Image: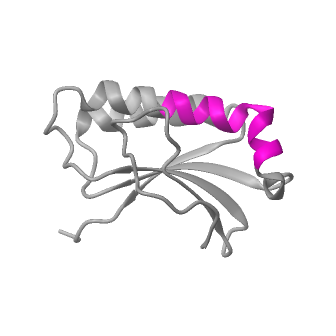
Amino acid sequence: MGQLNRRAMAGIQDPNTIDLITHDNRTDEFAVIMCESRPWGTDPAQIDQLIAKINSYAAYVLDEGFLVTHPEVSGKSIRIQIDCVDTPDPEAAQVIEQASRLLAEYGIALLVNRLGPTA
């Protein structure tokens, strides 16, 4: 993937920061990536943080300002991606599934990319 932005990852704790934007050469998609370095279910605020981050990313990619800032995205597919260390717990999975259905109505995919070791 070609990287557009290079900076420290804020994680889902900071809904006002886009962690990473990349271009996936295999799929010709742009991925707007949020990072979660904590295991799911370890912080009582984690689900609220996830919801806020997803909402922030959705607003960002649906806003015309995204295309102005990143004109190379024009005409390309966009996905929101959650990079995390393990499989989302049931509560996080439910939030992700609901957000995925809503974003699909706008042609935006939401997917989870598990970075941790396989079981």
Q: Is residue 105 magenta?
A: no
Query: Start and end of the magenta stretch?
Result: 54-69
- Extreme residue in the front direction: 7
The quadrant of the image that shows the C terminus is bottom left
Side of 81 relative to 74 (left or right)? left
Quarter of the image where one finds residue 48:
top left
Tell me if 52 is positioned left or right of 110 in this view: left
Q: Residue at the location (37% across, 39% down)?
A: 12
Q: Position of residue 79 (x, y in %)?
A: 61, 50
Vertical side of 16 occupied by 118: above or below: below
Furthest toward the left, the residue is 42
Q: Residue at x 84, y 52 (%)?
A: 71
Q: Position of residue 70 (x, y in %)?
A: 77, 52
Q: Position of residue 52 (x, y in %)?
A: 43, 26
Q: How is the image coloured?
A: one colour
| Residue located at (39% from left, 46% from top) | 10
Q: Is residue 58 magenta?
A: yes
5 on left or right of 114: right
Residue 34 in the image: x percent, y percent? 45, 48
Prevalent SS, magenta region: helix
Tally of numbered discs? 0
- Residue, x 21% and y 49% (percent of image)? 38
Quadrant in the picture for the N terminus:
bottom right
